[in-house]
Amino acid sequence: MYAILDIETTGGKYNEEGITEIAIYRHNGRNVTDQFITLVNPERTIQPFVEKLTGINAKMLRNAPRFFEVAKRIIEITENCLIVAHNADFDYRILRTEFKRLGFSFERDSICTVSLSQVLLPDLESYKLGKLSRSLGIPISDRHRAHGDALATVKLFELLLEKDSSKQILKSQIKAIHTHQVPSKYLSVIEQLPPATGVYYLHNAVGDIIYIGKSKNIQKRVRAHLTANDRKSQKIQKKLHKINFETTGSELIALLKEQHEIKKNQPQINKDGRYRLYPMGIRIDRKSDYHQLVLEQVRNHNDYIAVFRNGQVAKNIMLKWMKTHQFCHKHSSLKDSDGACYGYKNNQCKGACLCDESPQTYNERLLQLIYKKKYPHDDFLMIESGRKEGEYSFVYIEDQSFKGYGFYELNHQINCKKKIHNRIIPIEDNTDCRALILSHIKHNKYRKLIPLIETELSSS
């Protein structure tokens, strides 16, 4: 079965678009068996050029159903169907985005009539729907409206099915989407896994954990392990007996849990991540009169300004810091001479190598790096998505140290530190945690960041 569809949107930034109209025709390979066409109130502004192109405006959508009101119908009409669309990547992405906003994962296989046309109808001047329809004599009305474009795509797809009489082209296109099929012995295991964000644990026949992973779609990631042919996947397929999982809602919490659980359990197949996600670090050694900027492999007993996934990236960052802040090469692990350092010769050092700059002044400048790489507040909550509708998650930082995470539904459950401690799931702090949390903050991958004081957090 096929679900042939077209979607019109508000336009705007990537993954911030909203659906304004959707048309879906359910097709059995011979004719249409069901259809669903509706305007949708996107609850966001339509871009002016889109309004001009489609003719759909805010006034038309004022009384239209919102996406959550039509989501169930979309699931029903596309169930057990291959999604077919002209530029399917766009339409499928928009659908998945809308369902994700509702807290649901929409998973369907899809096929694109653009790529299918390019194989079955080579040498055409254009594969845009309008020009393609005209060149094939397919009537198309209400161009750039969902129902008109979807109906034209139906006629185009029927023509492509006829041209591909042996169905070999169509099968190869679908095969490229499906890649490898899951072995039958794993089907029941896969069905029990959620298409949700979290951490999964793969066990062998005696119950030992052989692999720990995280994913924004646990079911899809485990399916990949069980169908791929790489060395790691083959080891998993050979030893897998049982799968457990924990959903987190938040990708950051999944990352924090994953690295913590790998260090704690040291699974056999997690060799690359067994010890550290960020094995290289830069720190300040204060044992000498002039403090030293040191690049080294991360050690548990040392505090680091920043940590990195590989040594070359760490070295490049360190050189950038030294140039920007005029730090001395002689007083670092990159020491290059006993006299004037490389930086001094290139006007990139204030002369600490020759004692032209005092240790006190130099050390104070060096210590500023620590303050620049700290968390934005000593105590704060980072609010993230929860595991279900109406729930939120939080990551808790206290006195510049990561303490753990938790979940809540009502604001009063986290309105003071005592209540936060009551709900928290503790995780040991380490350099990997700091790097993961700082990266999330840097890229604004959170719902809300709340500085903490010992008063009620009514704004949470």
Image (cartoon, grey):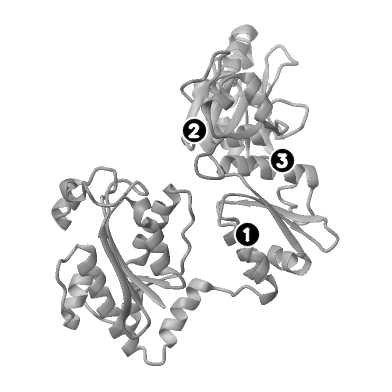
The numbered disc on residue 260 is 3
Closer to the eye: label 3 or 1: 1
Q: Quadrant of residue 338?
A: top right
Disc on the earlier residue, 3 or 2: 3
Q: Whole-percent x and y of residue 85?
A: 33, 69
- Name the foreground residue: 317 vs 120: 120
Check the image and report above or below for 411 versus 256. Answer: above
Of the two numbered discs 2 and 1 on the same chain, state the one appearing first in sequence. 1
User: How far from the left and from the top, in percent, is residue 363?
Assistant: 62, 13
The mark that comes first in sequence, 3 or 1, is 1
The residue tagged 1 is 193
| Amino acid type, label 1 | Leu
**Is 339 placed left or right of 92 in the picture?**
right
How packed mark 3 is, by other alpha carbons closer than 10 Å (few <14, some 14-19, many 20 or more), is many
Q: Quadrant of residue 341?
A: top right
Q: Does residue 217 sit above or below 86 in this rendering?
A: above
Residue 445 at x, y percent in the picture: 48, 38
- Outermost residue on the bottom side: it is 166
Q: What amino acid is labelled 3 in the image?
A: His
Horizontal side of residue 18 vs 424, given as left or right: left
| Residue at the image point whose x is 71% and y is 51% from the top | 272
| Numbered badge on residue 442 | 2
As shown in the figure, which amino acid type bears the numbered disc 2?
Lys
| Secondary structure at numbered mark 1 | loop
**Residue 195 visible in the current orientation:** yes
Nearer mark to the viewer, of 2 and 1: 1
Q: Is residue 86 visible?
A: no
Q: Are marks 3 and 1 in contact (CB under 8 Å)?
A: no
Q: CA distance from mark 3 to mark 2?
A: 22 Å
